[in-house]
Amino acid sequence: IGRLLSPARDTEVIRQTLTKLETRLSGNRRIIADRLRQHLDQTGLLETDEVHGKVLSSLGRAKRRFAQIKVQNGGFDVLEAGLHATYRKGRRALARAQLEPDDEAFHDLRKSVQQHWRQMLLVSRAWPEMCRARASAARDIAQILGEEHDHAVLAAFADTHRNNGLASEEIDIIQQDCRARQLELQ
């Protein structure tokens, strides 16, 4: 379902990220960002009725499958292994982002943090103070990593439109501004 929605989601992310970036820019840099927005408005992808229908159909199937899930006995043991696995995966993603700080590594870290955040919300009734604090911290980190990723998406979009509406030098300027913001957020 996420893959069906990703072109429209990416278009909206790029639009919002350009708006955020523009508030940090002045002069010629702001003009370049505005020109890239105009190019996005001409070429951006929107959700079509066909995609909308596929999404609703997929959600209906998922809802029916979810309703059929039966959890039998086991208590916390049923969840413990999954919680440990997700946490280990997140620690590996953090180590990788520290060793290889590229867009993919930080995106993987973001996904792990989001998963931990949601898991803490799911089990928060078992230990409210601890789980809510962890969920809150994970949410905050996920939001920062989300903005970092949004700038990576914008930089990639700009690169794919090099010499197609904007000069290569103008694209370089947008990418430099995106990378600078990513480094701040990292």
Image (cartoon, rainbow, N blue to C red):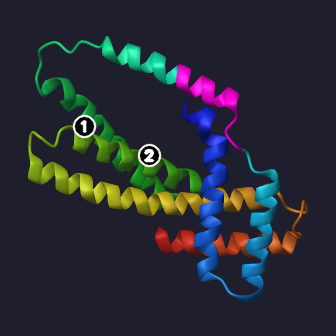
In three-dimensional space, the C-alpha distance between marks 2 and 1, rounded to whole angstroms, equals: 16 Å
Indicate the quadrant where residue 22 lies. bottom right
Q: Is residue 61 above or below residue 114?
A: above
Q: Circle 2 is placed at which residue position?
A: 111
Q: Is residue 151 above or below residue 10?
A: below
* Residue 67 spot, x, y in % from top left: 32, 15
Q: Is residue 169 above or below residue 106?
A: below
| Stretch of the chain drawn in magenta | 46-57
Indicate the quadrant where residue 66 lies. top left
27 or 74, which lies in front? 27
The residue positioned 56% from the left and 73% from the top of the image is 181
The residue positioned 42% from the left and 59% from the top of the image is 143
* Residue 172 spot, x, y in % from top left: 78, 72
Mark nearer the N terminus (2 vs 1): 1
Mark 2, other Cα within 10 Å: few <14 / some 14–19 / many ≥20? some
Q: Main secondary structure of the magenta part?
A: helix
Image quadrant where one finds the N terminus: top right
Say how many tags the image has: 2
Res. 70 in view:
yes
Name the secondary structure under disc 1. Answer: helix
Which label sits on residue 44?
none
Q: Amino acid at mark 2?
A: Lys
Q: Circle 1 is placed at which residue position?
A: 84
